[in-house]
Amino acid sequence: MKHVAVVGAGVAGALLTLRLAEAGVPVDLFTGTRPDDASGASGGLVRGYEPDPATAALAAAGIAELRSDARMRDWADFAEIGSVYVTPVSQPPVPAAVDQVLTRLPGSLRLAEPAELPLRDVPEGAVAVRERFAGFIRPARLRAKVLAELPRLGVTVHTRQITAVSGATVRAGAEGFDGYHAVVVAAGAWTRELVPGDAFTTRQIQYGLYPVRVAGLPSFVDETSGLYGRPYDGGRMLFGLSSDRWGLAPEQISPDEDLSARVTACLGERLGVVAQPEQVVASFDCYTEPAGLRLRRAGDVLTFTGGSGGAAKTVLAASRMAARELVPASEGAR
Ligand SMILES: Cc1cc2nc3c(=O)[nH]c(=O)nc-3n(C[C@H](O)[C@H](O)[C@H](O)COP(=O)(O)OP(=O)(O)OC[C@H]3O[C@@H](n4cnc5c(N)ncnc54)[C@H](O)[C@@H]3O)c2cc1C
């Protein structure tokens, strides 16, 4: 079995390492030394439905794993409170995506009228995709639990900040580690520092924690307004809108007060809620087109990133798929 190096220990790198190690592949994981990453800030909303059927298949498979594997459910602290996704008027539910969810999670999904929800002024023609087996996970806890498990599986975990990669070698300054049969960069928004090219960019993601509860709202995304949210610890709610801050380096991210003001206004209009955030969380993710966490080749290395604001949903299944792609590749390199 051939050796793999994984660079980056957000949920993507950590779960990929777990899958490889559980398949018997020797792995060196380089965690880096940056304390604040997307996985640490993630809101963790999970549901099966996505308009893209392939993404829906991954997301639904992840929820099926959370429901069938007590260990993963505990590690992720899966709160199965349900989910609502209100479609854009111009994009009604995609039958092939609905089928992907129902195949993996029978009985979980139904299409409903937005009038069932405590949302105001939803435009005519929007549809509520309601799911029972959905809710939220805690990506930071999932990552921490996986990292704690890895040494038992024989993984060597290096807390090194990697400065250069090539097909067989990773370097941390003057220190080199080589002889790998595959090097996978899972460094999230920092991937573009290690991998040349313009395949990846960054986008700010920001949400606020509000001292309110809204009855009848599980985890939700309302595509007609852009508002998303979920119940949060301490009797609060997490609410957010998409940010238009693209391309910033992670260290340039700071709270966007205009965006917070837009969320507050939207809460008033859509939910009749008058509240200011107690706390604003401003972070970032690695974006790419087409979006999605998967293995991609970049020269002589591989990348496993590109979650584009959604990898908490897909990481469980995407990491399995990536490990399956890598195992024959490393076997073939014998
Ligand atoms: C605020 C916020 C809310 C979100 N909410 C949701 C949600 O509700 N639902 C959902 O599905 N998704 C959500 N997401 C998206 C999801 O959380 C991310 O897609 C996912 O966490 C990305 O994980 P990652 O491992 O790719 O990247 P990261 O978590 O950013 O991890 C990258 C890791 O690489 C390490 N690294 C960087 N450079 C180096 C180096 N040179 N050497 C070694 N290591 C390095 C970093 O230290 C870091 O630990 C949210 C994201 C954010 C930011």
Image (cartoon, rainbow, N blue to C red):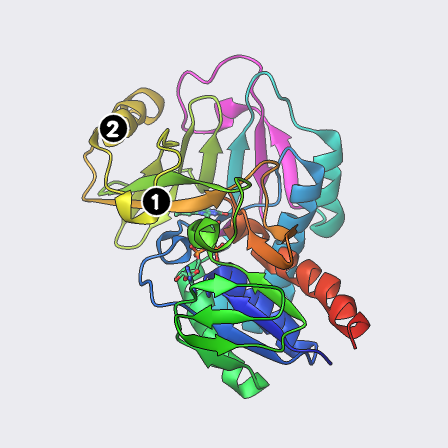
Residue 190 screen position, x and y as percent: 42, 53
Q: Which mark is residue 249?
A: 1
Report the span colored magenta: 108-136
Q: Could you tell me the amino acid type at mark 2?
A: Thr
Q: Could you tell me the amino acid type at mark 1?
A: Ala
Q: Which residue is mark 2?
A: 264
- At mark 1, the secondary structure is loop
Does residue 133 belong to the magenta stretch? yes
Task: Indicate left or right for 104 with 301 as reference.
Answer: right
Residue 315 screen position, x and y as percent: 57, 56
Compare residues 120 and 283 and report the one nearer the observer: 283
The numbered mark, 1 or 2, whose residue comes first in the sequence reads 1
Q: Which mark is residue 87?
A: none
Residue 126 screen position, x and y as percent: 56, 19
The residue under the point 44% across, 78% down is: 158
The residue under the point 67% across, 60% down is: 322
